[in-house]
């Protein structure tokens, strides 16, 4: 692997980690009642989980800077956890939509924005970063995706 | 490469907790709509049965069967979602890694590594989990595992958590359910430590296991597993819980003065009032105490009994009466009590057969009830002090 490939990898890990850390801390602050303009419902536990995902991304930066391929594992697990939370939130959004469509009492005043938590939009940023990394490095043998999957 | 992260010395445990939390958050939140749909269906059915011109039959069907069994069936969606999540985790190969991660924690405090596998199975049902303790080496290690496995929160307790958390902590309901499961693990580890240090001293050995390769879970396999467990729950609801509902309805409608008395003068009130003074510090009225006593048979009966004793149908209605009967602190204490006291009569029987001794089965019941009582009391006392 070339040094430039590791640079792209650790920069991505650092960026993803920073995004989740900032997102998590802002959500945590908003959940604790501080006047932070984060469009989401109060949920300190979910916010804390984002901080843990950030720590996982950050843990990959050091080995990748040293040229250690094991650092890709941290990005892979971070993306996986972020993806799981994103997917589960979409399922929750879908079930709430179903309740709204059926006109169930507790869902009459439901609106989709309340379910678009930072878990959703942060992962969209991660996908964007992932796409950039793939575009820069390519996806063939030795490409970014291959590294993440341990190939 | 991913194993170096999932089994990481420092990150392994937080990752395990994040996955567990995501599972319970999803289980609770995604099932709400389906619970509401089933509830509406039973409310409609209850409306029909209440029109029956024979009063006692109308009451039996409406308050006893629809209000009792129907109310417990409302909790089928969270049970299905939880088993679906566990099945996905198992199929991917992560659950074996979770056992490995927890093994490190358990070994650090001198416990047997292999013990965590039965404990993990205890999230589903205590009976097979206790049987799985046969794989644990050493008599003291095996006995310790058997004794602490019932502290792991089984699926039958889930309806109680979902009901109480939904009523008293609606904004953090998923997190509250997660906290209960974590508390179960913490108490199991703490009690194991106590037993190993006192009555069941013995050597600990590290866990040696072959980790399965990561697999992509199949929708068919995961849904089939979830449905199999859900079907077992429905069969239980249609047999034991139906019988339990009828017995509870009879006890709630008969008393020394005969049939058709108020619940306050019924046999079930007499049973509840026997234990009520003990639970006065917890803030549990006799209705809750009765439900807990009958919950010794099976945990699903706690929720079923509440519906029958309060003679209301549906989560919203029972939520209203519970909100009047309990403070949020007492509600939390109730969740802790349900988590820690004996899961069911089948568990007691399994402990008896696995240990070959009524002494250990009896000890298990006594220590769990005492532990549940003290821990729930602690919640009320400490919570009261903090709020004051």
Image (cartoon, coloured by chain):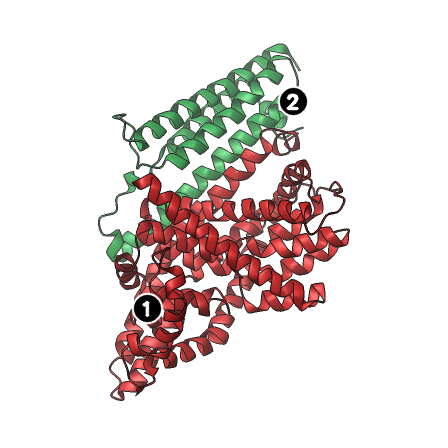
Chain colours: A green, B red
Above or below for B169 versus A52? below
Q: Position of residue A33 (x, y in %)?
A: 27, 31
| Proximity of marks 2 and 1: CB atoms separated by less than 8 Å | no
Q: Position of residue B54 (x, y in %)?
A: 27, 89
Q: Which quarter of the figure has residue B213?
A: top right
Q: Which mark is residue A142?
A: 2
Q: Which mark is residue B335?
A: none
- Determine the residue positioned at 63% across, 56% down: B147
Residue that carries the numbered disc 1 in the rendered image: B41
Q: Compare residues A116 and B366 and report the one nearer the observer.
A: B366
Q: Compare residues A12 and B14 and report the one nearer the observer.
A: B14
Q: Residue furthest left?
A: A109
Asked whether, in this view, residue B193 is left or right of residue A79, the answer is right
Q: Secondary structure at mark 1?
A: helix
Count the marks: how many?
2
Chain letter for mark 2: A
- Determine the residue positioned at 26% across, 75% down: B47
Above or below for B259 versus B362? below
Q: Compare residues B356 and B218 and report the one nearer the observer.
A: B356
Q: Quadrant of the N terminus of chain A?
A: top right
Q: Compute the Cα span from label 2 to label 1.
A: 56 Å
- Determine the residue positioned at 27% across, 25% down: A36
Q: Position of residue B22 (x, y in %)?
A: 47, 42
Q: Position of residue B263 (x, y in %)?
A: 30, 75
Q: Residue furthest front?
A: B277
């Amino acid at each position: 692997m070339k040094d430039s490939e590791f640079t792209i990898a650790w920069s991505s890990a650092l960026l993803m980690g920073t995004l989740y850390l900032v997102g998590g801390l802002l959500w945590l602050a908003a959940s604790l009642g501080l006047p932070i303009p984060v469009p989401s419902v109060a949920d300190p536990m979910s916010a804390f989980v984002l901080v843990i995902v950030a720590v996982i991304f950050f843990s990959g930066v050091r080995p990748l800077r040293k040229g250690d391929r094991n650092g890709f594992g941290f990005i892979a697990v971070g993306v996986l956890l972020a993806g799981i939370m994103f997917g589960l939130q979409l399922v929750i959004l879908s079930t709430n939509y179903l309740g709204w469509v059926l006109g169930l009492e507790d869902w009459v005043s439901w609106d989709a924005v309340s379910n678009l938590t930072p878990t959703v939009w942060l992962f969209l940023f991660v996908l964007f970063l992932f796409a950039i990394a793939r575009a820069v490095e390519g996806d063939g043998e030795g490409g970014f995706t291959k590294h993440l999957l341990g190939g | 490469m991913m194993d170096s992260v999932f089994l990481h010395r420092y990150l392994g445990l937080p990752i395990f907790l994040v996955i567990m939390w995501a599972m319970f958050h999803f289980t609770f939140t995604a099932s709400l709509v389906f619970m509401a749909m089933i509830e509406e269906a039973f409310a409609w059915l209850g409306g029909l049965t209440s029109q029956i011109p024979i009063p006692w039959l109308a009451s039996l069907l409406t308050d006893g069967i629809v209000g009792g069994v129907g109310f417990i069936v409302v909790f089928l969606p969270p049970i299905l979602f939880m088993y679906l999540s566990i099945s996905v985790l198992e199929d991917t190969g992560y659950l074996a890694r979770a056992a490995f991660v927890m093994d490190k924690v358990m070994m650090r405090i001198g416990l047997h590594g292999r013990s965590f596998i039965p404990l993990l199975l205890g999230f589903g049902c205590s009976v097979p989990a206790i049987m799985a303790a046969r794989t644990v080496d050493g008599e003291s290690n095996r006995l310790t595992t058997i004794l602490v496995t019932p502290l792991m929160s089984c699926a039958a307790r889930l309806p109680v958590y979902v009901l109480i958390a939904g009523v008293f902590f609606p904004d953090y309901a998923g997190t509250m359910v997660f906290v209960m499961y974590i508390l179960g693990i913490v108490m199991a580890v703490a009690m194991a430590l106590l037993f190993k240090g006192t009555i069941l001293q013995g050597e600990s050995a590290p866990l040696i296991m072959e980790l399965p390769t990561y697999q992509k879970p199949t929708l068919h396999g995961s849904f089939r597993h979830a449905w199999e467990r859900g079907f077992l729950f429905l069969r239980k609801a249609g047999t034991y819980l139906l019988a339990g509902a009828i017995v509870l309805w009879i006890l709630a409608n008969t008393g020394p003065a005969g049939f058709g008395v108020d619940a306050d003068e019924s046999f079930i009130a007499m049973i509840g009032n026997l234990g009520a003074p003990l639970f006065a510090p917890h803030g549990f009225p006799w209705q809750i105490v009765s439900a807990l006593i009958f919950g010794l048979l099976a945990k699903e009966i706690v929720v079923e009994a509440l519906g029958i004793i309060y003679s209301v149908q549906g989560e919203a209605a029972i939520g209203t009466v519970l909100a009047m009967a309990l403070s949020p602190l007492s509600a939390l204490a109730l969740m802790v009590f349900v988590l820690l006291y004996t899961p069911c009569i089948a568990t007691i029987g399994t402990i008896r057969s696995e240990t070959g001794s009524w002494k250990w089965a009896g000890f298990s019941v006594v220590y769990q009830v005492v532990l549940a009582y003290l821990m729930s009391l602690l919640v009320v006392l400490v919570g009261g002090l903090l709020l004051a």
